[in-house]
Each structure stands twice: as C-alpha cells, then as structure tokens.
Amino acid sequence: MGIIKERFKLKADAANAEIKDLLKEHGNKKIGEVTLAQIYQGMRGITGLVSETSLLDAQEGIRFRGYSIPELQKSLPTAIPNGEPLPEGLFYLMLIGELPTEEDVHHVTNVWQRRSHVPTHVFKAIDALPISTHPMTMFVVGVMALQTESDFAREYAKGISKKDYWNPTYDDVMDLIARLPRIAAYIYRRKYKNNEHIQPDGLLDWAGNLAHMMGFEDESFKELMRLYMTIHADHEGGNVSAHATHLVGSALSDPYLSYAAGMNGLAGPLHGLANQEVIKWIFEMQKELGTDNPSKEQIEDYVKKTIAAGKVVPGYGHAVLRKTDPRFTAQMEFGKKHMPDDKLVNTVWKIYETVPPILQSLGKIKNPWPNVDAHSGALLVHYGLVEYEFYTVLFAVSRALGVLANLCWDRALGFPIERPKSVTTSAVKRWLKGE
Ligand code: AMX
C-alpha cells in the first residue's frame, strides 16, 4: 500500500471511531430549525452535510482544514523560493488533515506523474464533438470516457465488502486527478491552437505541467496556475459542484461519474461559469464604451444598465460569504506583484471600487462584495489566455482536488445514500391548516 493511502486509512479509522462516539453521546442533539421559507429558497442556512476538507466563514471566507489562504501561502511547499503554494500540498492537507512536508508534496507530484496516462479513446471521444462545443462539455465528455478505467466500478461488479469501498475510491481519485491536466490541455489545444498538442514534461509539477501542455512557458504563468489550482479547490460541502459530486457519489456511483456530475453543475453561470461571464461582461462594456480604460463613472453607468436589464453583475454576490472573498484578494495581490500596470487588471480593481455600493443600494442583495470569479479572468488575459469559454475548465481541474478528497472521506466514513424529504405545496397548505 502506498504511503499516502496508508496514512489516509489510519486517519479515517481514527475519525470513524471518533464520529461513532460523538453520535452515541450527542446523536439526538438538535443542530438547528428549518423554516418554510428555507425549503423554497435553496435550503440556504440549513446545516445538512458533513465535509471535512474545508469550512466557510461568512465574514472571513474559506479555511482549508483550519488554514486560511494567506496562511497556506506561507506554510505550503512551493516550486520556487517564495513562490505560490503547490496544489499537491493542499490536496494532501485536505485528504490527511495535516500540513505536508516538502517530501510529501514531491511524493504526490510523482504519484500523479506516474498515473497521468490518458487512454486514446478519451481523446477520440472528445474529437467526436464539433469544434464549436463548449470546453466544459468536452471536459465532462472526456471524464465520462475515462470512466472505463474505474477501479471502484470493477471491484463493485466483482463484489466488494462495504468496509473496502474507500480503497478503490482512493485509487480512482488519484488516477482521475493525475489525468485531468492532460484532458484540459488537450481540449484547449484542440479548440484554440489548431489541434497541435504538447506532450507532458515529466519533470514538472501538476499545475506547472498543465501550463506547459497548454503552451504557456512563462514561469509567472506557471505560478498563477499553482495559485489558481490552490484557491479554487474547495469551498466547503454545500456549493453546487461539491454537493452534486457528494450526492451522486452517495449512490455509490464511482468517482468518475460523481465528479462529472459535479462539473456539470460547475458549468452553470451562477456557479463556475461566472468566471467567463465576468470577462465577457467587461469586454462588452469596453466595446460599448469604446475604451479599454473606462472611468469609474462609466463603469457605474454600465453596472446600473446591467441591473436594469434584469441581469446579475457577474463575479459579485455569494450564497454564504458576506465580505470580499479572500480568493479575490489573493488574486489581487498576485496582480499587484506581477502586473500592476495591466489595464484590464486595473479595470477589475476599479469595478471593485464601484460595484459594492451600487449593489448595496438595491437593498435586496445579501452580499455586494466580489467573489473568486470577479478577478481570475483578467490575470489569465494578461498572459494571453484570452479564450474565456475555457476558464471554467481550469476551475474544474482545481475543484477536483476538493470534491475528490471529499469523496475518499465519504466512502471511508461509510456515508449512506443521500435522500432528503421533499414536499408539495398542497402538502404544505394541508399542514398549515393542521390537516
Ligand atoms: N448582481 C445583481 N443582482 C444580484 C447579484 C448580482 N451580482 N447577486 C445577487 N443578486 C440579486 C439576486 O438575483 C436576488 O434577486 P431577486 O430577489 O430579484 O431574485 C437578490 O439579489 C438576493 O440574492 P442573494 O440572496 O443575495 O443571493 P443568492 O444567494 O440567491 O445567490 C449568487 C448567490 C452567487 C448566485 C448571486 O449573488 C449571483 O447571481 N451572483 C452573480 C453570479 C456569480 O458571480 N456567481 C459566482 C458565485 C461564486 C461561484 O460559485 N463560483
């Protein structure tokens, strides 16, 4: 058994015993109340899931196993001195629950390198789609084609004990994460770079290799990919992509099926697709105003026009967060360090100064502050990654780290099939009448 798998098993056994005791003693304690409004309004505020990898505080933002993004930037191993964290380290932290050493992180890099071979039929499945297909559709089709490789599905068909579900799940998770950069880069080069592909570099880390295979050799772009893959990885359990992966996994669908389901959710404009929507919205604003350097007043007018047209301002607002997203701030810091004079990046910062008071003045928006998607596109455009329909694929590669580390825990903790109760409005009316 590999060393990380062995450590995970030890941690999972200890957690299982702890949770058993916890439920024995406190299983009947009430954790909250549910109002009628909540069940009609997206279950907002209802605690109904366990997700060990990260926790979101409405004011402070995300913490991964207790560590904030700035803390991780200080304590996770990097590829270059004083560089951005390696996402391999974040995955280790989410899976094992402890900060990794340099050696642990190199080990994860090596394991993913070894497992990264993508079978030919996956590329053929992607090639069967018209070139106009959205990159997220190509991506999910690629993941689904890869499902032929599932250890879990094979072992389950043979007849595996419940106690051992975690084991082939872990192997599928490591294989799938290892192969995603190749699939993503293949889609990028097929759609935008004349179908001319770049072979992986066996000496590079996971995110560095993704940049390389996409055709970006600039060291600071590789650093951006390391940061991007780290900050987009997880946002506790209730967001659409994490919840959908967990839900489908609860039916014992294997990690490929579960992750594909989650990524279909990430492809929605209110979730992961918002990163492409932000840049599209800024490009449209620039076109309409006839300038690539709009003033605050011009931005203000454009924002008001967007809202008056019944549309949302992409990149702003959040279902849980109530302050500026620390993932936005981390990208802003990266911008200040690497491209302080970039016009588009400066426009993003001007939008940040303009939008919150306007949204606040509407009186109905719970969070007028920017989320992760408000910034990411402008950094990518700076390096020449202008094909914004591709942005959600990068988000998806990163999100694999969180939702799949979670899936390992779901199977190791023996979580059952998820099946909340639903009601009809007629049933609600009868209940209100006391019938
Ligand atoms: N622009 C304009 N209106 C907005 C808005 C925005 N950015 N954010 C929220 N609102 C509106 C809602 O549409 C809603 O209007 P309604 O009552 O007329 O239907 C009202 O304000 C109250 O919404 P809320 O409770 O504050 O937000 P929510 O929890 O229902 O939705 C979210 C959260 C993210 C879907 C929403 O803020 C939004 O649509 N934002 C823009 C899209 C976006 O950036 N999504 C990415 C989120 C992060 C991610 O998942 N990657």
Image (tube, rainbow, N blue to C red):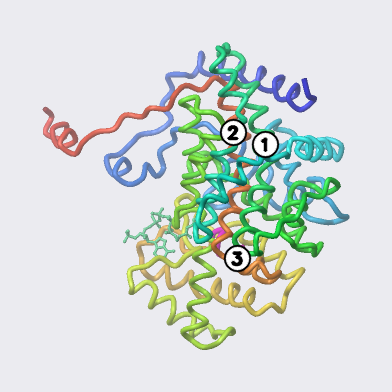
Of label 3 and label 2, which has the lower sequence position? 3
Determine which residue is flagged by label 1. Answer: 94
Left or right of residue 242: residue 72: right
Determine which residue is flagged by label 2. Answer: 406
Q: Is residue 394 above or below residue 252?
A: below
Q: Which mark is residue 285?
A: none
Q: Amino acid at mark 3?
A: Gly
In three-dimensional space, the C-alpha distance between marks 3 and 2, rounded to whole angstroms, equals 27 Å
> What residue lies at 62% left-to-right and 58% top-to-bottom?
190
State yes or no: residue 296 in magenta: no
> What residue lies at 36% left-to-right and 65% top-to-bottom?
363
Tell me, yes or no, whether the two marked residues, 3 and 1, touch with CB atoms within 8 Å: no
> What residue lies at 32% left-to-right and 42% top-to-bottom?
38
Q: Position of residue 130 (x, y in %)?
A: 50, 57
Nearer to the camera, 233 or 14: 233
Determine which residue is flagged by label 3. Answer: 377
Q: Residues within 10 Å of mark 3 (few under 14, many from 20)?
A: many
> What residue lies at 17% left-to-right and 33% top-to-bottom?
427
Q: Position of residue 262 (x, y in %)?
A: 50, 42
Tell me, yes or no, whether the two marked residues, 2 and 1, touch with CB atoms within 8 Å: yes
Magenta segment main secondary structure: helix
Disc 3 vs disc 1: which is toward the camera?
Answer: 3
In three-dimensional space, the C-alpha distance between marks 2 and 1, rounded to whole angstroms, equals 8 Å
Locate the N terminus and report the quarter of the image it occupies: top right
Q: What's the magenta region?
A: 371-376
Q: Is residue 341 above or below residue 102?
A: below
In three-dimensional space, the C-alpha distance between marks 3 and 1, rounded to whole angstroms, equals 26 Å
Provide the secondary structure element on which disc 2 rests.
helix
Provide the secondary structure element on which disc 3 rests.
helix
Q: Amino acid at mark 2?
A: Asn
Q: Amino acid at mark 1?
A: Met
Q: Position of residue 283 (x, y in %)?
A: 53, 76
